[in-house]
Amino acid sequence: MNVTTPILRIGLAGLGTVGASVWRRLASQKDLLRQRTGTEIRVDQVAVRRPERARECGVPEKLVTPNWHSLAANPELDVIVELIGGTTEAFELIRTALQNGKHVITANKALLAERGAELFQLATKHQRHLLFEASVAGGIPIIRALREGLVANRIVSIHGIINGTCNYILTRMNEAGLEFEDALAEAKREGYAEADDSLDVDGHDTAHKAAVLAALAYGFWVPPGRLYTEGLRGVEKQDIVYARKLGYGLKLLAIIKTDPDGAAEVRVHPTLIPQSHVLASISGVFNAVLVRGDVVGDTLYYGRGAGGDPTASAVLSDLAQIASHFPQEQKARNVGHEALHSRLKTMDEIVSRYYLRLMVEDKPGVLADVARVLASRQIGISSVIQPEAHAGETTPLVVMLHDAPESQFRAAVQEIAKIGAVKAPPVSLRVEDFI
Ligand code: HSE
């Protein structure tokens, strides 16, 4: 019997680092993917602005079009892979492709964080897949883990190191004793940071990815602007040194969790974590995501979060998912409709442990004054360190605190800043113990 292999026809939009790897890897893994999915995955059209880029990547001229409109309008294509980035044209491309009955694969976390709710509604309306494995943590299959491997679990919490550039910077500040600006300059020299570094170091890229993970975990899209985001610019080397003395390491974490009463918190900020915890050992550009499910307990995912081939691996996995069922239609499961937890806490409502560094004049009664303010707000001290100082000198006083509501902690810090012996604005960091 002669059974013909079905062909899944792809339109590839964008030939940047990831697009070029997708093109190359679809060729190198072609036979493997056909064996595993029973379908041939074939790129039939490529949209790229500069024709010379297509030549560099070895894309035959007959496949190339200079604009994405022809991809979205091409009736022969089954799937559009959106790798052009940005949030304007990419939105139009995805919208048009879905309206024209095509499945869409995207790596665009900024777009999903901004307009995911709209796009998934559209995908549902047209019963098309909108897949996005490459949007969070590059090559780590975290989206599929949440949607499939952990589908029977309520997600208790997710803690993610999901920006390689920031993790590289913090690793170098810790290991080589660099200040933030020097570590950032090194990351740029090594090709790990963009010339415009804001998306990474101000935490926005992590926040976009956190919004995607939260939508998967809790079924709603955090409105842009309501996701608390703090990046690395305020981090000083001395705080990494003191924290290490206290047994903690510093990571830029995406934190997503719920209370037993169902209120969710989604936030991104530099966070102290115990050095003995596995996430503290994630160094350099690597990513890791710790997911706690109510049935499974803790699970950990580790790998490369950026780069052409790791990200292409994720795009190819989305293509394989569609190819495995092709040409039958698999019911499209979209994101952000389940509203498992629809109340998002404000930052004032969160409860955390804190690290507080004060620059104080070394004189009798200062520690007592600080302790009095904290005690008046029911905030307990768990440890204190102060380097040996001479009377009258300004010295750091580092205080680790027990759990406190953020609102109480902030109010206490404002009061402490007014104590006469406190000579500089207090520095604080949140602490996670993973209990
Ligand atoms: N710039 C990101 C990172 C990769 O450093 O992880 C793309 O999201």
Image (cartoon, grey):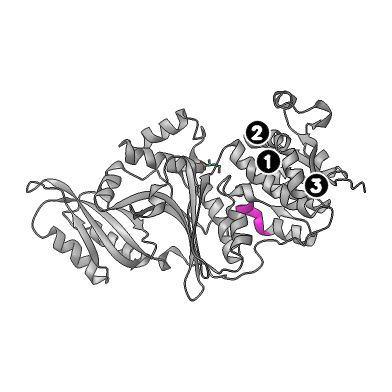
Q: Secondary structure at mark 3?
A: loop
Q: Is residue 71 left or right of residue 53?
A: right
Q: Is residue 393 left or right of residue 31?
A: left
Of residues 3 and 78, the one drawn nearer to the viewer in this rendering: 3
Q: Amino acid at mark 2?
A: Gly
Q: Disc 3 and disc 1: Cα gap in Å?
A: 23 Å
**Residue at image location 89% in from the left, 46% down from the top:** 4
Q: Disc 2 and disc 3: Cα gap in Å?
A: 26 Å
User: Which residue has dot 2 on it?
Assistant: 16
Q: Secondary structure at mark 2?
A: loop
Can you give x and y, in whole percent of width and height, for residue 27 in the image? 73, 34
Label 1 Cα neighbours within 10 Å, binned few <14 / some 14-19 / many ≥20: many
The span shown in magenta is 111-117
Residue found farthest to the right: 1
Q: Earlier in the sequence, mark 2 or mark 3?
A: 2
Q: Nearer the viewer, mark 3 or mark 1?
A: 3
In the rendering, which numbered label is found on residue 83? 1
Can you give x and y, in whole percent of width and height, for residue 283 in the image? 41, 43
Q: Is residue 86 visible?
A: no
Q: Earlier in the sequence, mark 3 or mark 1?
A: 3
Q: Secondary structure at mark 1?
A: loop
Mark 1 near mark 2, Cβ–Cβ under 8 Å?
Answer: yes
User: Which residue has dot 3 on it?
Assistant: 39
Can you give x and y, in whole percent of width and height, for residue 231 in the image? 43, 47
In the rendering, which numbered label is found on residue 321? none
Of residues 59 and 397, the one drawn nearer to the viewer in this rendering: 59
Can you give x and y, in whole percent of width and height, for residue 341 in the image? 56, 70
Q: Is residue 34 above or below residue 413?
A: above
Q: Amino acid at mark 1?
A: Leu
Mark 3 near mark 1, Cβ–Cβ under 8 Å?
Answer: no
